[in-house]
Image: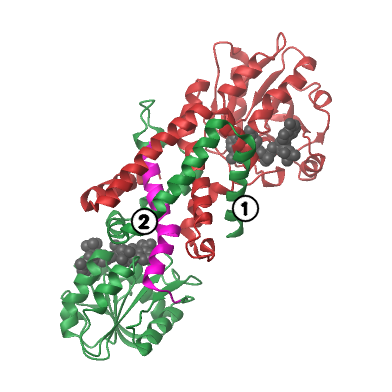
Chain colours: A red, B green
């Protein structure tokens, strides 16, 4: 049970956690903090927040858990701002999509007796803001928690429990391993989707408006290319090495397929497509 | 009104056209032809077909419209087989995803008084077979019809009318232009999706099963990578030049994004993602 939860950055991720914990009766009071006051007002109206405070240092007073869910690059900045006023026993955790950058910085910012634990729910949508949040976002999903050798066991236990109450399975993972895995299964697909929409948009062979001709397949395929540009800018900036590695790995497969198309190799083309279909069907 | 429609290759595309025309009372009798007799039996059971005939030459007897919806490479073969027995006035049309290859070959196969018109409904799913067909597949979608200078105007009019009755808007397009446009909006995305799933599947940095960790975003993004390997083999074989061109065009955008990630160029990354988001949101 969390007595008072402070959420900094009350958007899709922070708002959905607040809603989920409230519905699970796993939290007493929920205080919202955000640089966008309009967003906070909406959060109170929607019943996501009990109250809000614009100043982070004031907002975190008396919170036993502080959840930071702003874009990745700003998480250490936000944590640095609140750290000096946190009372011993407070737990600070986050929902940022990149973990090594966040965890390394935030662990070093904690005053005596205050503990940081990194986390990342593997669930989201392409929409942003508190109005996009919903209580079941995390239901049946995974939320990865990334302890290090510095992590306090009791704080870890409390963060794991928080995500369980929100509906998640909670695997533990090293921050570096997390970042490499997410590069492959999430960051790479986003880089590919963004590149694809830009390429089709830039393909001016006909002068006409190609995108207007696209059907359902294209729309579904490119849904993730509608994700928030600031969020993804920060991910690209902070998980650079792993993203470059997966992009190069993918480019190798694309080049391989290109050579099969060029050669008109019917058997190898069918095998390439079949392997993809079988692997994709197996995760349904 | 079509008196007797013969459908050769009674799968998702042919079965859905049969169902749609039946519901619109736009067809008298529907005869199914397929190399898979089990499939034909199922088509009769499901009410998609009135009856079936295994031998194509026998099956097309008395049909005023023959619709061929087998994989692209086999369309000219199938048409060559039936052409000699077709009576003057018969119209042969198809639903294949590549048009220059099909139209050029089939036009030349027509006996005196029999007319070929190429077509391609821009609507589908990743599922195959008559059991996957449904009457509303084409509702509100486009079906592109691709006449050439050789096309008979009355035959063209009848094929356009057929797709309208099935629920489609029917733009006319040159076969070559069709193939280049579809390369960009459909064939390229499929090549990218197949490459992505194979790449993630092949990325063995952790030994673990990466695909098991994927969430909804990845599953939606890669849905088209579950499409039929034979259908896509044939598309890759018959629209080779245009697919290679779009793959190279896309690879340029991917390389551009890679260089922004490598440089850590925050502004340019955000602009790249924002352009994609704006263009994608505009087609919703
Ligand atoms: N969306 C997903 O699918 C997903 C999934 C898993 C994890 N995540 C991670 O979760 C975090 C939040 O993502 P989200 O989708 O919830 O974003 P969001 O809906 O845009 O919410 C973020 C909120 O934080 C506010 N904010 C930004 N910078 C701030 C700062 N320096 N101080 C205080 N508030 C600030 C934003 O205000 P403004 O509107 O004024 O910027 C916004 O209200 C990110 O780190 C992201 O990587 C996202
Ligand atoms: N699926 C889409 O999204 C989509 C969209 C637009 C256009 N198209 C085009 O529509 C056509 C059919 O696609 P579909 O998705 O309907 O495929 P499908 O569901 O697999 O149906 C094709 C049917 O044709 C049969 N067949 C294959 N070769 C044959 C031959 N030589 N003679 C007689 N029957 C044969 C198949 O039998 P077997 O099962 O024994 O192979 C199957 O029953 C393709 O040209 C495709 O490019 C597809």
For the residue carrying disc 1, how many other residues have a C-alpha within 10 Å: few (<14), some (14-19), or many (20+)?
few
Tell me the quadrant of the picture where the C terminus of chain A can be found: top left
Q: Is residue B82 above or below residue B112?
A: above
For the residue carrying disc 2, how many other residues have a C-alpha within 10 Å: few (<14), some (14-19), or many (20+)?
many
On residue B278, the disc is 1
Kindly indicate the quadrant of the structure image that contains residue A114: top right
Query: For the magenta stretch, what is the residue range?
Result: B172-200
Determine which residue is flagged by label 2.
B243
Q: Position of residue B257 (x, y in %)?
A: 52, 40
Q: Position of residue A95 (x, y in %)?
A: 62, 30
Nearest to N terminus: mark 1 or mark 2: 2
Residue A58 seen in this snapshot: yes
Tell me the chain of label 1: B
Question: Along the horizontal axis of the image, is A112 left or right of B223?
Answer: right
Residue nearest the viewer, comparing A127 with B272 = B272
Question: Looking at this rendering, what residue extends furthest in the top direction?
Answer: A112
Q: What residue do we see at 16% from left, 85% from top?
A: B85
Q: What residue do we see at 37% from left, 59% from top?
A: B242
Q: Are marks 1 and 2 on the same chain?
A: yes
Tell me the quadrant of the picture where the N terminus of chain A can be found: top right
């Amino acid at each position: 049970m969390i007595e008072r939860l402070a959420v900094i950055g009350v958007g899709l991720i922070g708002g959905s956690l607040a809603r989920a914990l409230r519905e699970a009766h796993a939290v007493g009071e929920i205080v919202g903090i955000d640089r966008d006051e309009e967003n906070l007002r909406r959060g109170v109206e929607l019943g996501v927040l009990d109250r809000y405070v614009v100043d982070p240092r004031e907002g975190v007073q008396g919170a036993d858990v502080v959840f930071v869910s702003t874009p990745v690059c700003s998480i250490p900045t936000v944590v640095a701002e609140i750290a000096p006023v946190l009372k011993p026993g407070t737990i600070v955790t986050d929902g940022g999509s990149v973990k090594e950058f966040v965890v390394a910085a935030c662990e070093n910012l904690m005053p005596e007796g205050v503990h940081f634990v990194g986390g990342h729910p593997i669930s989201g949508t392409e929409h942003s803001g508190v109005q996009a949040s919903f209580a079941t976002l995390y239901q049946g999903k995974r939320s990865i928690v990334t302890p290090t050798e510095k992590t306090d066991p009791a704080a870890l236990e409390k963060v794991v429990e928080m995500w369980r109450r929100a509906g998640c399975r909670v695997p533990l993972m090293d921050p570096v391993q997390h970042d490499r895995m997410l590069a492959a299964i999430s960051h790479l697909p986003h880089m590919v989707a963004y590149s694809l929409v830009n390429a089709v948009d830039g393909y001016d062979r006909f002068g006409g408006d190609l995108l207007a001709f696209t059907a359902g397949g294209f729309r579904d395929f490119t849904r993730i290319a509608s994700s928030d540009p600031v969020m993804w800018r920060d991910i690209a900036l902070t998980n650079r090495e792993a993203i470059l590695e997966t992009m190069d790995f993918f480019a190798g497969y694309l080049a391989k397929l290109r050579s099969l198309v060029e050669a008109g190799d019917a058997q190898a083309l069918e095998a390439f497509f079949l392997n993809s279909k079988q692997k994709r069907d197996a995760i349904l």
